[in-house]
Amino acid sequence: MKMPARKIMLCCWLLVIATGIGFLFWHNEWKFNLPTPVPAGYQPVATGSLINIGAITGIKTGKPVFLHFFNPSCPCSRFNLTHFKSLVRKYGDRISFAVVIIGNDQNYNAGFIQYKYDLAIPVLFNPSIAAACGVYSTPQAAIIDADNKLWYRGNYNKSRYCTAPSSNYAQIAVDSLLAHHRQPLLSEAAFKSYGCQVPYCKK
């Protein structure tokens, strides 16, 4: 018994839709696994560079400073927010944390970000902080030690959702700093920028 033409057409449409959805998921996964292009005129900042963190952020605590570069419009920034908040809870008594907002949406302020993402830490909107730390993508972490030297700048984890403990790069860097160890030997993936390009999120 032959299948009616209407059913055949419906099956074809469902197949096309399923294929399209599958392609979008694949493309999204593939795109965010690629390194962020290095912008023209980028000036790298070497580990150990002196950064006058108090002057550019207003944070003057005598403790190391952990800067979380965040774009609310960037999917990658949202993927690791839970992990970042866990770092704040774990190390907040020994390290000063702050969020640095990078993006082109002017419809939010510090209070909005703190409320929406349940963050009881400073929220900064100074784009020069990214340049001072050599950051050109979100999300990124920059850790400045108590002597105002750049200890670490890079990714949080090789996994998008920060679920691989062995590649918790930012946390490994924090642990090394607090234990007064040498800077950890991390893989190249820790320092290659991924995610959304600063200052705009290119989806």
Image (tube, rainbow, N blue to C red):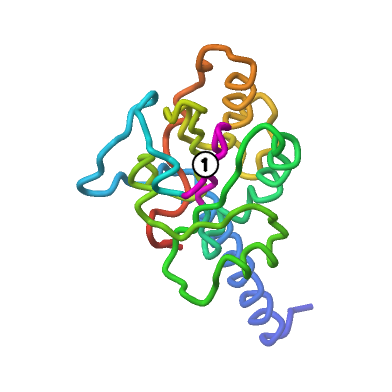
Q: Nearer the viewer, residue 187 or 71?
A: 71
Q: Nearer the viewer, residue 161 or 2?
A: 161
Q: Which residues are magenta?
A: 58-69
Is 59 magenta? The answer is: yes
Q: Amino acid at mark 1?
A: Lys
The residue depicted at 45 percent of the width and 58 percent of the height is: 102
* Residue behind mark 1: 60
Task: Please tell me whether residue 86 is drawn above or below residue 73 in the rendered image.
Answer: above
- Specify the farthest residue to the right: 1
Q: Nearer the viewer, residue 73 or 1?
A: 73
- Specify the farthest residue to the left: 41
The residue depicted at 48 percent of the width and 29 percent of the height is: 152
Residue 18 image position (x, y, % from top left): 64, 67
Task: Please tell me whether residue 13 is drawn above or below residue 139 in the rendered image.
Answer: below
The residue depicted at 55 percent of the width and 33 percent of the height is: 62
- Write down the quadrant of residue 104 in the picture: bottom left
